[in-house]
């Protein structure tokens, strides 16, 4: 039987995501892709993959997965969570490991991930990636369009995700040292393209205000609760293109930041656009998190993007060898069967 991860429990919303489906927005097809591109890249680097390899994006509550391969290397980056390694499905307790580290699991072992506690997303990368055919050049899941990923949907119990490798490479395990996933104090935006639909006072209130991520936020858009923003020229425009991070202000004055599964066009005025360098941190915010904004120039946004890409290129330099828990080391030594028996050197047989 081919190598796979069996879904024992799918979690709240677990999907396959990569960098997204580029070049099809003129056909009305959204990009999709990871909400937190930086953590996706970090998980892949930790697993030994190219940064854009498709991985699992976990939202709020993690899945339980059983290894159906000789062995597999997995890496977990993003929100903190209780990650438990069980010897099999019947076990009630196992060994806890941390996020931002890799681990090698053998056939039959189970990884169980609990609730995420400090962010909304966690990425699970598997060495070699998944043996899933791309759709329009991407393995990302677009839920509303039933496109890509694993049958165009979130994982469900009983799914068997095929793996590209049946065994992990022989190497040490690693963790990240100095990986900073804390959100910025203020998210940077470039005003517009329809900032002229708002008065100078409304723009100032938007930049001075504080918002909270509201219930109803999803991969398409982050709804923000806070002081409503007054329109100066109405709230309808001729529909135009939607960029990642566009902040629409509909008729109720409550801003919506458009994310990975955003529509390709929209007809509400966009007061500002979150710069691409800050989108990964925004994408990992949980419901209730506080959000405020500051205006920057296009030149500053370009410089920040370059800095983000340089940081991704330098991820491998942040890897340090991982010291495994004693229980895991003991289990691995036992499984290795390093000796076949014991001989007493004092006996006549010796």
Image (tube, rainbow, N blue to C red):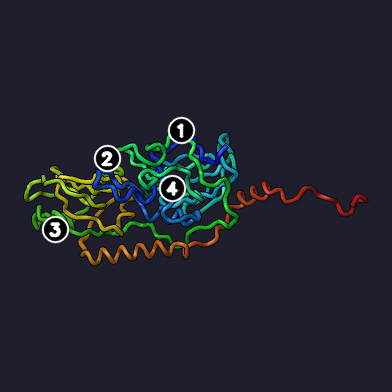
Q: Position of residue 72 (x, y in %)?
A: 55, 47
Q: Residue at x 53, y 39 (%)?
A: 66
What secondary structure is found at the residue carrying circle 3? helix
Marking on residue 55: 4
Per the model, the C-alpha gap separating discs 3 and 1 is 49 Å
Q: Where in the figure is residue 95, as x and y percent of width and height?
A: 56, 46
Real-space Cα distance between discs 3 and 4?
A: 40 Å
Which quarter of the rendering shows the N terminus? top right
Residue 57 place in picture, x, y as percent? 40, 46
Spatial distance from mark 4 to mark 1, Cα to Cα?
A: 18 Å
User: Pointer 3: what residue?
Assistant: 204
Q: Residue at x 51, y 37 (%)?
A: 6
Q: Which numbered disc flags the more N-terminal residue, 2 or 4?
A: 4
Q: Which residue is mark 1?
A: 157
Q: CA distance from mark 2 to mark 4?
A: 25 Å
| Residue name at image x 36 percent, y 57 percent | 182
Residue at (32, 46) in percent of width and height: 32
What's the distance in space between the residues labelled 3 and 2, CA to CA? 26 Å
Q: Quadrant of residue 42?
A: bottom left
Of marks 3 and 4, the one in the foreground:
4
Numbered tag placed on residue 216 in the rendering: 2
Mark 1, other Cα within 10 Å: few <14 / some 14–19 / many ≥20: some
Earlier in the chain: of badge 4 and badge 1, it is: 4
Dot 4, how many residues are within 10 Å of its Cα: few (below 14), some (14-19), or many (20+)?
A: many
Pointer 3 or 1: first along the chain: 1
What is the secondary structure assignment of the residue under circle 1?
Answer: loop
Q: Is residue 221 left or right of residue 339?
A: left
Nearer to us of marks 2 and 4 is 4
Q: Nearer the viewer, mark 4 or mark 1?
A: 4
Is the Cβ of the residue at disc 3 closer than 8 Å to that at disc 1?
no
Q: Residues within 10 Å of mark 3 (few under 14, many from 20)?
A: few
């Amino acid at each position: 039987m081919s190598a796979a991860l069996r879904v024992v429990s799918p979690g709240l919303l677990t999907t396959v995501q990569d960098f997204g489906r580029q070049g099809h927005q003129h056909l009305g097809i959204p990009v999709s892709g990871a909400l937190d591109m930086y953590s996706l890249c970090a998980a892949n680097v930790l697993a030994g993959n190219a940064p854009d390899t498709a991985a699992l994006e976990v939202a709020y509550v993690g899945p339980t997965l059983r290894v159906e391969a000789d062995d597999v290397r997995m890496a977990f980056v993003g929100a903190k969570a209780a990650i438990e390694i069980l010897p099999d499905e019947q076990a009630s307790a196992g060994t806890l490991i941390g996020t931002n580290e890799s681990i090698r699991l053998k056939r039959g072992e189970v990884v169980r991930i609990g609730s995420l506690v400090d962010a909304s997303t966690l990425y699970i990368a598997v060495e070699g990636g998944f043996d899933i055919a791309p759709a329009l050049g991407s393995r990302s899941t677009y839920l509303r369009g039933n496109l890509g990923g694993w049958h165009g949907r979130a994982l469900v119990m009983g799914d068997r995700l095929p793996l590209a490798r049946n065994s992990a490479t022989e190497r040490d395990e690693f963790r990240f040292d100095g990986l900073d996933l804390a959100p910025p104090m203020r998210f940077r935006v470039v005003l517009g393209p329809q900032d002229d639909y708002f008065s100078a006072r409304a723009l100032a209130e938007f930049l001075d205000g504080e918002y909270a991520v509201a219930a109803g936020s999803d991969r398409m858009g982050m709804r923000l609760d806070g002081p409503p923003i007054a329109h100066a020229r109405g709230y309808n425009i001729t529909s135009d293109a939607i960029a990642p991070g566009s902040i629409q202000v509909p008729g109720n004055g409550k801003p919506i930041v458009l994310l990975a599964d955003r529509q390709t066009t929209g007809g509400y005025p966009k007061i500002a656009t979150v710069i691409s360098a800050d989108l990964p941190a925004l994408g990992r915010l949980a419901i209730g998190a506080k959000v405020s904004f500051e205006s920057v120039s296009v030149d500053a946004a370009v410089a920040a993007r370059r800095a983000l890409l340089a940081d991704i290129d330098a991820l491998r330099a942040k890897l340090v060898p991982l010291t495994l828990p004693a229980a895991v080391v003991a289990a691995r030594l036992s499984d290795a069967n390093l000796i076949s028996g014991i001989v007493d050197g004092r006996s006549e047989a010796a």
